[in-house]
Image (spheres, rainbow, N blue to C red):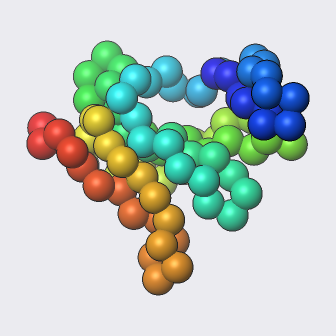
Amino acid sequence: TQKYDDISNTWSLSANLNTAVRGASGFQLNGYGYSSGGTGVSVTNITQKYDDIANTWTAKANLNTARQSLTGFVLSSCPSLICNLNIN
């Protein structure tokens, strides 16, 4: 995993996801980064939370259904919303 510093315009290495995935949704909520869904060995419902201060990933509640190629965003009326762009 890499993180971007917009002040220095550089990328640096950070902690690896607990479970490696591709095609996951990434979004920010309350100062933490999240990764949900994606594909590892197969399509997954895993959600992981990144803490930039501690440089750690923590497992969180899984999506109800495994999904890949997602879009995630935050609304004021809904803490986080995941939209599936690829029906599995």
Above or below, 9 relative to 47 = above
- Horizontal and vertical percent position of residue 28: 60, 53
Q: Is residue 9 left or right of residue 72?
A: right
For image coordinates 26% across by 22% down, the residue present is: 42
Q: How many discs mark residues in the rendered view?
A: 0
Q: Is residue 62 left or right of residue 87?
A: right
- In the rendered image, the residue lying farthest to the bottom is 77
Q: Where, quadrant-wise, is the C terminus in this rendering?
A: top left
In front of the other: 41 or 9 = 9
Query: Picture quarter containing residue 16?
Result: top right
- Horizontal and vertical percent position of residue 21: 43, 24
- Horizontal and vertical percent position of residue 69: 29, 36
For image coordinates 78% across by 36% down, the residue present is: 6
Res. 15 visible in picture: no
For image coordinates 67% across by 36% down, the residue present is: 57
Query: Picture quarter containing residue 25?
Result: top left
- Horizontal and vertical percent position of residue 24: 40, 35
Q: Where, quadrant-wise, is the N terminus in this rendering?
A: top right
For image coordinates 26% across by 29% down, the residue present is: 43
Res. 10 visible in picture: yes
Above or below, 60 relative to 3 = below
Q: Is residue 63 left or right of residue 17?
A: left
Above or below, 20 relative to 75 = above
